[in-house]
Amino acid sequence: MANNITFDTETDLPDRAVLVSLVTDSVKKKGINPEYSLHELVQLAETAGVEVMDTISQNLAKPDPKFFIGKGKVEELRMAMEAVDATTAIFDHELSGAQVRHLEESLDVKIIDRTQLILDIFAQRANTREGIIQVELAQLTYLLPRLSGHSTNLSRLGGGIGTRGPGESKLEMDRRHIRNRVNDLKDQLEEITKHRTLYRERRQKAGVFQVALVGYTNAGKSTLLKELTDADVYIQDQLFATLDPTTRVLELPTGKEVVITDTVGFIQNLPHDLIAAFRATLEEANEANLILHVVDASSEMREDQMAVVQSILVDLGASDKPQIVLYNKKDRCTPEQLEMLNTGEGHLTISAFDEADLLAIRDAIQTILTGDTIIFRIPADRGDLASLLYRVGEIVNQEFDGSDSLYEVILHKDDYEKNGYLLQDYIEVSHT
């Protein structure tokens, strides 16, 4: 995929932006690291193809209702933007329509907030029909209550960040038309959701074990999927490199096959409209038998990123799923970082490019998938039960005792729970 550069339609130059952070009392109470959040905003802007010229921070007890950062700070921002010939101001927070309008009138530049920036990146990444519909729905839902604040903005700078993507041609519609379009998109998404749900139900009825890869954006989920399954997925060291979920078959050491799905990456302050629009996609995590939580172990904000992922899993109703934490990118970690990692049960320290680590992941999945090792005594005339054993587990040994056969079987938990009652009377020896 080519590098995305956004252009100002009047100057034919890439967007040049000054990034703005506001540190309030509530931010401090929540324990949010404003410096890291601003660093992340720089990454988001660069991912969107913006040239970051400068950053500015402001401390206030609470946001200014009119100018967000206060009138005096707006003047400082205006001078900073003029000094670097910036065309855009990007705020590390969500702005109201009124705040956008007042800032725009004072600065005479394009005003973008964090939510709009993330939506813009998703607009660049959407490739499938489902992804395009989801992004446009999120864009219009975000825009609807802010039309009055963005009208001048949209008419002055028709291109670049904040105005592109599947929803670009809809941005200047009136509220009535946008509401109609939103309803239409929801109907289309509902049809797609029905098909996705049907596929999931078919996999469940067939006894297919489902694994979901989740994690903070750029944790390495897509790379891991590619190395585990040879999946042809887009890999890039940038935020939200992949948007559309990819499902592939993964073969375990015993030969048992499971399906594994890569989901969209999470990020702090992920827009609510985006979560709502992508809920059908994120349901892959909710319907999975097992979640692989991929963590960038080399990140200085590792614990905060893990907390963000867990919080979103709670919102999705998937927090109680069996989970394996994969501390990825161990080759980028310092010795001190490696020492801090949890090495207990349910945690693996890995590199997606280490064959031994990939095998360890398969073994860990298999351990959760399989249950006890049990020996069954099956009479010679019960071929139906012998066939059932092959369906619900892995036959590791078979011996003959008179007219009976003794089968040593590693059971697959889900498969056995569905049909195992038929075998209860034939258990010879049970051990773990």
Image (spheres, rainbow, N blue to C red):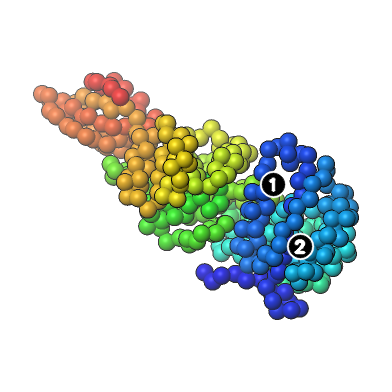
Q: Which residue is mark 1?
A: 34
Q: Nearer the viewer, residue 126 or 197?
A: 126
Q: Which residue is mark 2?
A: 89
Up the image or down, 71 lies above or below 390; here it is below
Image depth: mark 1 or mark 2 in front = 1
Q: In the drawing, does residue 76 fall left or right of residue 229?
A: right
Q: Residue at x 56, y 62 (%)?
A: 128
Q: Quadrant of the C terminus?
A: top left
Q: In the drawing, does residue 204 fall left or right of residue 400?
A: right
- Name which of mark 1 and mark 2 comes first in the sequence: 1
Q: Which amino acid type is shown beneath numbered disc 1?
A: Pro
Q: Nearer the viewer, residue 61 or 413?
A: 61
Q: Which amino acid type is shown beneath numbered disc 2?
A: Ala
Q: Secondary structure at mark 2?
A: strand
Q: Secondary structure at mark 1?
A: helix
Q: In the drawing, does residue 196 fall left or right of residue 18?
A: left
Q: Residue at x 87, y 49 (%)?
A: 65
Q: Residue at x 84, y 68 (%)?
A: 108
Q: CA distance from mark 1 to mark 2?
A: 18 Å
* x then y, percent, for residue 348: 41, 39
Is residue 60 visible in this depiction of the protein?
yes
**Quarter-of-image position of residue 86:** bottom right
Task: Rate crowding at label 2 as few (under 14), some (14 to 19) or many (20 or more) other CA atoms within 10 Å.
Answer: many
Q: Which mark is residue 285?
A: none
Up the image or down, 233 lies above or below 385; here it is below
Up the image or down, 425 lies above or below 362; here it is above
Is residue 137 visible in this depiction of the protein?
no
* x then y, percent, for residue 64: 86, 49
Q: Residue at x 47, y 60 (%)?
A: 235
* x then y, percent, for residue 224: 43, 51
